[in-house]
Amino acid sequence: MGMLDDTLKQLSQGENVSQPLLVVFQELLMGGQQDGQQPTAPRQQQAEAVQPKANAAQQGGGVGAGELGGLGGLLAQLQQAGLDDAVRSWIGRGENKPVQPDALGKALGKENIEQMADKAGFNVNDLLAQLSKALPGIIDQLTHDGRIPSQQEVRQRLKGQ
């Protein structure tokens, strides 16, 4: 899977990462789209994710992992939920601020987290711990140049192409 698999393997201290957990991360970052499908969120919506919270709030919330619109939608959802400072620290260069598992759970919504945990075969607390460890670094790597990449670029980077 490339970058995503490598990052998750590092966080798991070299152990193999379950395929369902990889799928959950893929859905969060790529909007649940399969290869060859169109992105689920317009490019403009992705770009708005790094704008002030007022713009991010216009995009609504409370959607499933695959319906967030990929990386841009995920970032907008996190910003709208009050994690703006952390999200901004992950984009571009510099130190990544941590995000607490409970804050991430609130930002993504209880129902969404429960669905993702079921899909990954994790309990909710374990999934949130994995997400809170991995998301800052993964998003930092995907946005190292300070911009949110297109869904196609995200897919290519995650698969190591």
Image (cartoon, grey):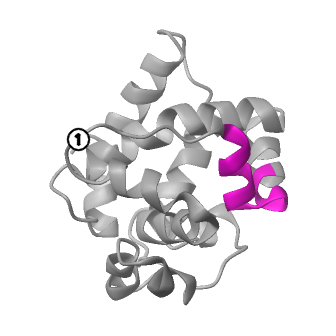
- The residue lying furthest to the top in this view is 14
Residue located beneath label 1 in the image: 94
Quarter-of-image position of residue 32: bottom right
The quarter of the rendered structure image containing the C terminus is top left
Name the magenta segment's main secondary structure: helix
Q: Tell me residue 84's x, y (percent).
A: 47, 62
161 lies left or right of 113: left
118 lies left or right of 10: right
Q: Amino acid at mark 1?
A: Gly
What residue do we see at 74% from left, 29% from top?
A: 126
The quarter of the rendered structure image containing the N terminus is top left
| Residue 34 in view in this figure | no
Quarter-of-image position of residue 117: top right
**Which type of secondary structure does the marked residue at label 1 adopt?**
loop
Q: Tell me residue 12's x, y (percent).
A: 54, 16
| Residue 17 in view in this figure | yes
Other-residue count near label 1 (Cα within 10 Å), few / some / many at <14 / 14–19 / ≥20: few
* Part of the protein shown in magenta: 101-113
Q: Tell me residue 153's x, y (percent).
A: 25, 61
Residue 112 or residue 156, whichever sits in front = 112
What residue do we see at 26% from left, 64% from top?
A: 149
Tell me if residue 111 comes above or below residue 4 in the rendering. below
24 lies left or right of 161: right
What residue do we see at 51% from left, 73% from top?
A: 69
